[in-house]
Amino acid sequence: LILLGAPGAGKGTQAEKICQKNNIPTISTGNILREALKSGTEMGLKAKSYMESGQLVPDEILIGIIQDRLAQEDCKNGFILDGFPRTIPQAEALDKMVKIDKVIDLEVSDEAIIARMSGRRVCEKCGATYHLLYKKPKAEGVCDICGGTLIQRKDDHPDTVKARLEVYHKETEPLIAHYKKQGVVKRVDGQEEVADTTRLTLAALEA
Ligand code: AMP
């Protein structure tokens, strides 16, 4: 299953819910890259400047990451992709690796995304996400799960969000047509409350 949608459309949040219900892993390429960056690997260093300016990391790096990850044991009964593919070459490479059953296209307007992302916070230790309005941590600035410090990602700053939306419209939106040709796309209105979006997403998966 692929979750498609602009940055901030709620792919990560919906992936968590689907994951709990179906017992399959979520693969977030953004999280994999952030981990690599934190542990200072060569891949992390290569990705850093792209990520911080809201640009896409080169396709060959991402295709390599996904190839390695999908080969792992826990993916054998299925998986959810959050943040991959993001370009036509990535989608074409993925088509050669696996058969995609469904693509959820989570639609949210650019205005709503800009408003949402300014309130987003993430745990610097475990990567759990929060929101100052919609998903507050129990104690301000502290992760409920691991006690880590909550920070605003550099790429969630307003100017970077605008750059990321431009990249999304140019590079990633064409994937909707790519997967429509395969007859696997379900459109979900992601503009509503999280619980409503989850209900719509689960219904789209069962349809
Ligand atoms: P995300 O958390 O999915 O928004 O990803 C954060 C950043 O990681 C993106 O803005 C890109 O710089 C990079 N990234 C994540 N996934 C991909 C991908 N599939 N292709 C290229 N860059 C990616």
Image: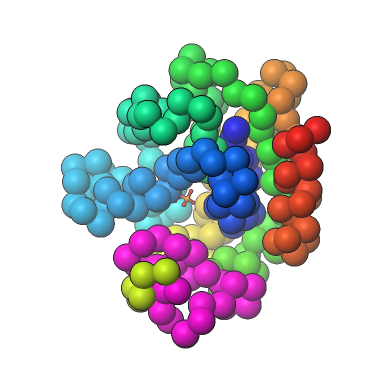
Magenta span: chief secondary structure? loop
Quadrant housing residue 127: bottom left
Location of residue 148 with respect to 197 vertically, above or below: below
Q: Is residue 133 magenta?
A: yes
Q: Residue at x 72, y 36 (%)?
A: 205
Location of residue 102 with respect to 160 vertically, above or below: above
In the picture, measured across the screen, residue 31 lies left or right of residue 194, that is left
The reply to whether residue 126 is visible in this rendering is yes
In the picture, measured across the screen, residue 170 lies left or right of residue 155, that is right
Q: Residue at x 63, y 77 (%)?
A: 133
Q: Give 1 or 44, whichever is nearer the viewer.
A: 1
Q: Is residue 16 magenta?
A: no
Q: Give 188 or 21, whichever is nearer the viewer.
A: 21
Question: Magenta segment range?
Answer: 121-144
Q: Give 193 or 157, whichever is nearer the viewer.
A: 193
How is the structure coloured here? rainbow
Q: Position of residue 108 (x, y in %)?
A: 72, 54
Q: Position of residue 203 (x, y in %)?
A: 78, 42
Q: Position of residue 4 (x, y in %)?
A: 62, 40
Location of residue 153 with respect to 197 vertically, above or below: below
Q: Give 161 or 36, whichever is nearer the viewer.
A: 36
